[in-house]
Image: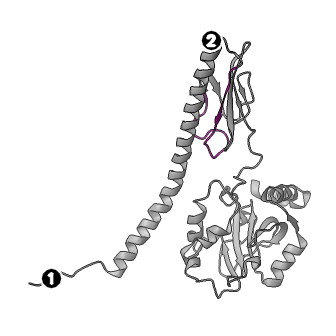
Amino acid sequence: MKQNRSGFTLMEMLIVIALIAVLVAIAIPTIASQLERSREAADLANVRAAYAQVSAEALLGDPQFEVTVALKQKQADWQSANPVNIGGIVHYKDQEDTDNWKGVATPNGTCTVSYNEEHGIILTWSGKASAYPFNTAVTDFFQSLYDTEFWKKGEMKTNYNFEFDSRCENSSYVPAINAEIKKLDNSLLQQKDCTWAYLGNGKKGQEANRYLFWTSLNTNTVGAGKSIPVIIQTGNGKYYVSETTTGQRSGKSYVTVSKSLGTAGYKQILDTGKEYPTLEAAYDAYLVALNSPKYDALHKTAQE
């Protein structure tokens, strides 16, 4: 009997793999959003249960009774509801404190439910809204580079000066990095209009000679040949705030976060900048630099 040994061709398998990768990249942000919604739903249910318990104890003659609920949510304030209604206490995002609502829900925070004879139930949330627009707990940005398939396969292991700029959308590497960045939780690299670039030496043991340049500015809008402030994270975890000059590669339309640099150029940028102990400290210093009169022209360009 003749056996049928037909199967998938290599091209067909590659197409299927590519389609799966696209679907996964699309699904991850949705899944992350749904997970946060489920965490917030659990927090609201627990706080409402505490509200009912404290109300009952007050009616039974114990107005000093209170319950503290540990929150599960991973983002400050509420993403799933606006306003939030807990037992008739209604509060909107960005609304100031009221007699019955104090503070803001924060990641790994708490809500203390207590009773006051004048105002009734009071919800006291443990923190204030973060001073930063991004999740400061996410700092291992190089892992997004190292988790790409091309890096795992060692495609950069002989490259002494790689460059992956987020504005180079037609790159064969940048989409892979973006897919990993999308898995992060509201990181610095996911801020609207920002530009980032991974640069440096891909050889083994050269982590200190790898750099992540970041600016809140859209370099395509800024244009080439302009001085801009940047936050720099080195591959060995150090933070700097310095200045680069935007560039444009030959025959390309996009504008990079920096002109072409070599080993000496990276060192010069670090030497002319200042080192900071944390991402938060570096970001604070970056904002001071960005808002200095030196960069007034950048703000005018961004508004045009």
Where is residue 298 shown, x and y percent of the image?
81, 60
Task: Reply yes or no: does residue 72 show up in magenta.
Answer: yes
Residue under label 2: 59
- Location of residue 292 with respect to 240 vertically, above or below: above
| The quadrant where residue 79 appears | top right
- Compared across the picture, whether 265 is left or right of 43 comes to right
Q: Which amino acid type corresponds to the residue marked 1 in the rendered image?
A: Gln
Where is residue 238 shown, x and y percent of the image?
80, 68
Residue 3 disc label: 1
- Compared across the picture, whether 279 is left or right of 107 comes to right
Q: Determine the residue positioned at 67% across, 33% down.
A: 111
**Which quarter shows the N terminus?**
bottom left
Where is residue 51 shown, x and y percent of the image?
61, 23
Q: Which amino acid type corresponds to the residue marked 2 in the rendered image?
A: Leu
**Which quarter shows the C terminus?**
bottom right
- Location of residue 62 with respect to 221 vertically, above or below: above
Under tag 1, what secondary structure?
A: loop
* For marks 1 and 2 on the same chain, the one whose residue lies earlier in the sequence: 1
Query: Bounds of the magenta span?
Result: 65-85
Prevailing secondary structure of the magenta residues = loop
